[in-house]
Amino acid sequence: MEDGAARFTVWAPEAEAVVLHARTIESAIPLAREEGGYWCLRLEGFLSGDRYAFSVDGKGPFPDPASRFQPDGVHGFSQAWMPSHAWKHSHPPLPRPARRSIYELHIGTFTSEGTFDSARGTLPWLRDLGVTLIELMPLADFPGQRNWGYDGVSLFAPARCYGTPESLCALIDEAHGLGLGVLLDVVYNHLGPDGNYLGIYSPRYYNPEKHTPWGAALNFDGPGSGRVRRFFMDNILHWLRDYRFDGLRLDATHAIHDESGDPFLGRVALEIKSELPERDILIYAEDHRNVNHFCLPAPEGGHGFDGVWADDLHHHLRRRMAGDNEGYFAEFDGSSSAIAATLERGWYRDGSAAEGFLSQGTDPAGLDFDKFVVCLQNHDQVGNRAMGERLNHQIESAAFRAVTALLLLAPETPLLFMGEEWGSSSPFQFFTDHNPELGRLVTEGRRKEFSGFSAFTRPESRESIPDPQDESAFRRSKLRWEEAIREPHASFLRFHRSLLSLRAGHPALGSTAKGSMRAAADGDAGLYYIRNSDGHSLVVAVCLEADGGFIWMPPPPMGGKWTSLLNSEDDGMAPEGRRPMEVVSEAGGRFGIRFARAGAWIGESAYPRPQAVSG
């Protein structure tokens, strides 16, 4: 919209006629065909907030495929929106790689109201928690009133059930004022099954020769793919420019089919740098293949991304701590040595069959630690369980504190899932709000998905899996914020804040270069890792056994001795009752911790400085 007029542009190369329908205009107005399969119209007097739709070859009206807002749902008329937020705050400097931490949240279940405005009220809490980046699960509008966001169909329009475009701008503006960066999860591997009108405008949006687990593949490399790629690149720039997001997480990039010589994913970072040269923007991929080219620079044949979701640490830890051994967990043994190797490498599956490593993956040796985003929990690893139970629902409190310390002080980029910081009692279940016919298929498919797991082989056991169409699954998934000030949750919160405070400021944690950390197992009771930077060392010793154990550690790399900094049995950290650790020192510099149960001990050492020699 410019100079009191609106310009409408639609790509529909096969169409014979495209017509605009506007609520403020009595008669429909045809668009003119232009070069490249586009249809265009300039209309005087059309204002931000006015409603409109298009008909194609006499069918419709349909919403704009690039609609900025769908106030009446994804099947209704689109609403024009001109960015007009009076931004109060500039972009905060992005945190240094070693200080980054991500907090993933779902707007609809993060607060009881489930809106942008209510989430804005929690931002001081997140700042005080100590995280540096917030990641919003997908916002593109979807059918119904509740959804994870991966059924989005109006890719440019924030879901109307969360609020208006203006309220999303206000949320991001407030986060920036508090020094928090904001990332958005975007989905370019498929669109949802209901309300998806791209095929109405052109069948070329899809490649009929390729498929994903969710249906036909989007067309990134077939005939007409140039215009399709432009549509999705414009979507990226829309979120970054109009809403001032600080970065994106691209969902399931392994399901983006693109065999062209110039892959779309390889253009993302280059295009962002070209279009927004003054901005520092983070780009992450979610990809289970453990491929290093995402994070390699373009001159080395890479995509230039800032990181990739690395699941191997999660899989080993859940196998070890909760006993999961079915599905993909069967590939991971959860041994202390495998966990230590994963920490030291960034991921475990590195493409080598030697030393017991699995063949999938590539060598991570050339990537700094911050390129690996690791977690104990995220929306997938919680919500894709049959009952949506969190890790802290399945293991003892002491064990949860132990692996929390392992995660938050590691050199990789840690991710927390909303409520994890206080050990939330809420599950995160799969929920949808599709029409009855589609909803029935979703419910059946969800229950069939678990038929291969031993707990759900019998039909009657599968009936216990929550129905995603039942609103109760959504309501159960909402956080209970009142818990955070009560025990045992308040102690979990104190522990998380203490660890994140160390991550933010301890000099030994200032580097993510390979070689700045080494990890080792001590038998199978647990492991330790040592991080070094700026003349300081920090050691994290973690016992993974419920009955405790003994972990020996080497002396600090540059001499001196370890001094206690924090442990999971400190005052205020163990509401179920403390079981203090015993520190044991021996001649020759050997140093160890005797754990009475699972736990974590953190120690530090400063390098002795050479004394000046007078002349």
Image: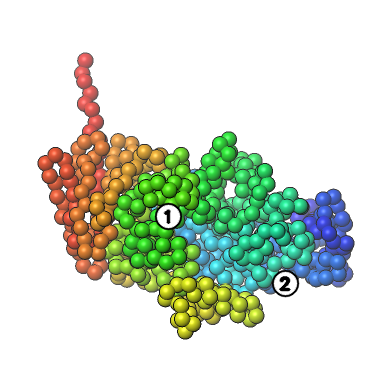
Tags 1 and 2 touching, CB below 8 Å = no
Residue 4 seen in the figure:
no
* Circle 2 SS class: loop
Residue 593 seen in the figure:
yes
Asked whether, in this view, residue 93 is left or right of residue 199, the answer is: left
**In terms of depth relative to the viewer, which is nearer, 413 or 212?**
212
Amino acid of disc 1? Asp
The quarter of the image holding the C terminus is: top left
Residue at numbered disc 2: 76
Residue 550, labelled with which disc? none
* Residue at figure coordinates x 21%, y 67% from the top left: 577
* Residue at figure coordinates x 61%, y 77% from the top left: 441
**In terms of depth relative to the viewer, which is nearer, 529 or 397?**
529
* Circle 1 SS class: helix
The quarter of the image holding the N terminus is: bottom right
- Position above or below: 46 against 473: above
Q: Which numbered disc flags the more N-terminal residue, 1 or 2? A: 2
- Crowding at dot 2, Cα within 10 Å, few <14 / some 14-19 / many 20+, comes out as some
Q: Position of residue 340 (x, y in %)?
A: 33, 50
Query: Seen from this angle, which residue lies furthest top?
Result: 615
Viewer-nearest of discs 1 and 2: 1
- Crowding at dot 1, Cα within 10 Å, few <14 / some 14-19 / many 20+, comes out as many
* Residue at figure coordinates x 49%, y 82% from the top left: 459
Q: Position of residue 427 (x, y in %)?
A: 43, 72
Cα distance between the residues tagged 1 and 2 = 43 Å
* Residue at figure coordinates x 62%, y 58% from the top left: 189
Query: Seen from this angle, which residue lies furthest bottom?
Result: 460
Residue at numbered disc 1: 312
- Position above or below: 470 against 43: below
Q: Position of residue 116 (x, y in %)?
A: 55, 65
